[in-house]
Image (cartoon, rainbow, N blue to C red):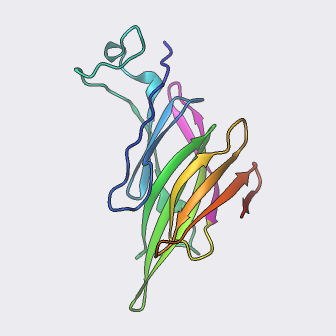
Amino acid sequence: MTVDFRWRMAMQSYGGAGGNMCTVSANTGVLAVAIGSFVDLYLLQDMEESSIHPDGTISSSSDVHIPFAAQVCLRTHLGTSLVNETDNVVATCVHFVDNTLLVGTLTTSRVGSQIERRASIQGFRVFGGTTSVVTHHAFNRLWKGGFTKIVAFESMGGTSTGVFVLAAGQSTTTSVDAMTWTDRCVSIHD
C-alpha cells in the first residue's frame, strides 16, 4: 500500500526557539519529530491501514498508530569541543532534503556568570523506511557570526543538496545564508 503525503506538518516550537519541529521524507516515508535533545523517527509506511481511507485521507475519528523506528541524540553528535556535561542542547528546527535530515540546534552554556548560546546544524543520512530505519551522522557545522539559533530551513529545489538557512541572533538580527553539502564536505555561502 502506498500513502500519498499531501499534507504539510507544521508543528511549531514554543517559546520562540525555532521553526518546524517535525518533517517528512517523501523518499523514505520517515517522520522526524524533534523533542528537546532528541529526534524521534517514525515509519509512516507502516501506519495501520484501518485508519487510511481509499481516497488516501486519514481518519480523524480513529487512533492512528505510527511505529517508532529510531532515536537520534543530538548531544552525542555535537562533539566534545562544542558541548560538555553541563550544556543544554535542544533542537530548534528539522528539515528533510532527500534522505538527509537537517537539525538546527541551540546549545546553552554557562561560562562563569555569563550564558553563552551557540547555533549549529547537524546532518544525518536516513536509510530504510519500509520496515526499519538506519541513521548515520554525516556532519556538524557550528554557525558563525553571533547567531544563536537556526530558525528555519528552506530547500533550494530540484535535486540540489542544499538549503537556505534562516538564523537569528540575540536581538532582532537575522541572516539568510545558503548551505550545500556532498558526501565529504559542507560549505556555507553568504
Q: Quadrant of residue 115?
A: bottom left
- Residue 53, position in %: x, y? 36, 11
Q: Is residue 160 magenta?
A: no
Q: Quadrant of the C terminus?
A: bottom right
Q: Residue furthest top?
A: 54
Q: Residue 16: x and y, percent? A: 37, 62
Q: Is residue 136 visible?
A: no
Q: Position of residue 77 (x, y in %)?
A: 55, 60
Direction from residue 182 to residue 143 in the image, left or right = left
Q: Residue drawn 44% across and 29% down? A: 7
Examine the rendered structure and indicate whether residue 110 appears above or below residue 91: below
State the extent of the magenta-drawn residues as a range.
Answer: 126-141
Can residue 111 be seen here? The reply is yes
Q: Nearer the viewer, residue 39 or 6?
A: 6
Magenta segment: does it hold 131?
yes
Q: Nearer the viewer, residue 107 or 85?
A: 107
Looking at the image, how many numbered discs can be counted on the residues? 0
Q: Is residue 21 above or below residue 83?
A: above
Which residue extends farthest bottom? 112
Residue under the image location 73 percent in, 41 percent down? 160
Label the magenta part by its dominant secondary structure.
Answer: strand
Q: Residue at x 30, y 19 (%)?
A: 59
